[in-house]
Image (spheres, rainbow, N blue to C red):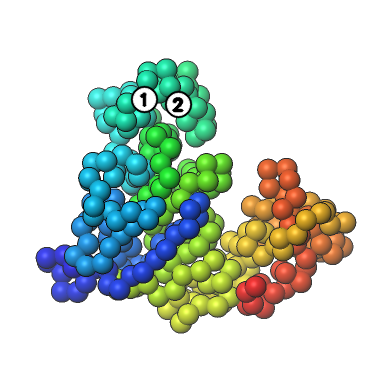
Amino acid sequence: MRYADSPREAVSEATLEIPAGEFVVVVGPSGCGKSTLLRTVNRLVEPQAGRVFVDGQDNALVNTTLLRRHIGYVIQAVGLFAHMTVAQNIAVVPSLLGWDAAHVAARIDELLTLVHLEPQLYRSRYPRELSGGEAQRVGVARAIAARPGLLLMDEPFGAVDAIVRASLQQETKRIAQLLDTTILFVTHDVDEALRLADRIVIMRDGRILQAGTPLQLLTQPADEFVAELLDAHDVVRRLQLLRVADAMRAAPGAAEGGRIESSATLRESLNDFLQGADELTVVQDGAAVGTLHFSDVQRVIEGEAQ
């Protein structure tokens, strides 16, 4: 893929397969081709070579309008319709797909609640009456209104301040887990990628250099560029960014030690281990999903992946 005014290809020889329900984050320096790669999925950019498949179907054979109605899309600029209320913005795609009014109304309230905006307060507001963070939450609600199986997010939180950004990151991860939606997310923020991703794709000069879990990339970077981009040699930073879920052992039953959330950082787990725990029960949504041993944290410190 090459733009007319560019001396090099924007994306070249990029092969990527995303299993259903996976949260994949594409990261790399500005101009590396990550947004171009994402936009080929909903045909905002038409590939000059190669093919893109969604649910086994070649995108090139699907009507563009129909394709986009079944793929959620969130961008940094949000793009809410200024003349429409929050409720009307969220209702756009479900209405186009022929949902009845009662179903649409219920979905609007459901989604506003999901993104932590009180329906009675926000349903009738206009975009100009929203803060940047509120507008971005409405943008996410609109993107998932028709329950798309795939959600594309292109630098969605780049225009908000650090505190709001952290909150939106947490909400996006929570929503992804609740809805089991496949997400392809683009960012230049490495910390954001490490916090959110099930799998990270590193790009440079239009090519995919490496793809893997956050733990795999931090402990086994493909080359020095990847290591420097991720700051993989900084052990403390590694423990601050990696989640318990990245290092836990999937195992039934409960450990004799304490309990820790799968979303907690490995640095948080050190508090329990330094107080004498040998292993911790990892919980998610109140249910035990695995165990974390001190040796698992040591493995990450020593730069070893499972």
Mark 2 touching mark 1, by CB under 8 A?
Answer: yes
**Which is nearer the eye, 155 or 165?**
155
**Which is nearer the eye, 25 or 98?**
98
Q: Which residue is mark 2?
A: 107
Say if 202 sits above or below 145 in the image.
below
Pinpoint residue 244: horizontal percent, then vertical percent: 67, 59
Residue 99, label in figure: 1
Question: Where is the C terminus found, in terms of image quarters?
Answer: bottom right
Extreme residue in the left direction: 4
Q: Residues within 10 Å of mark 2 (few under 14, many from 20)?
A: many
Instruction: Specify the quadrant of the image occupied by residue 38.
Output: bottom left
Amino acid residing under circle 2: Arg
Instruction: Specify the quadrant of the image occupied by residue 271.
Output: bottom right
**Which is nearer the eye, 42 or 136?**
42
Pinpoint residue 57: horizontal percent, then vertical percent: 33, 54
- In the picture, measured across the screen, residue 40 lies left or right of residue 27, that is left
Q: How many marks?
A: 2
State the separation of the CA atoms marked 2 and 1.
10 Å
Q: Residue at x 70, y 57 (%)?
A: 268
Q: Secondary structure at mark 1?
A: loop
Q: Secondary structure at mark 2?
A: helix
Say if 295 sits above or below 47 in the image.
below
Say if 1 sits above or below 111 in the image.
below
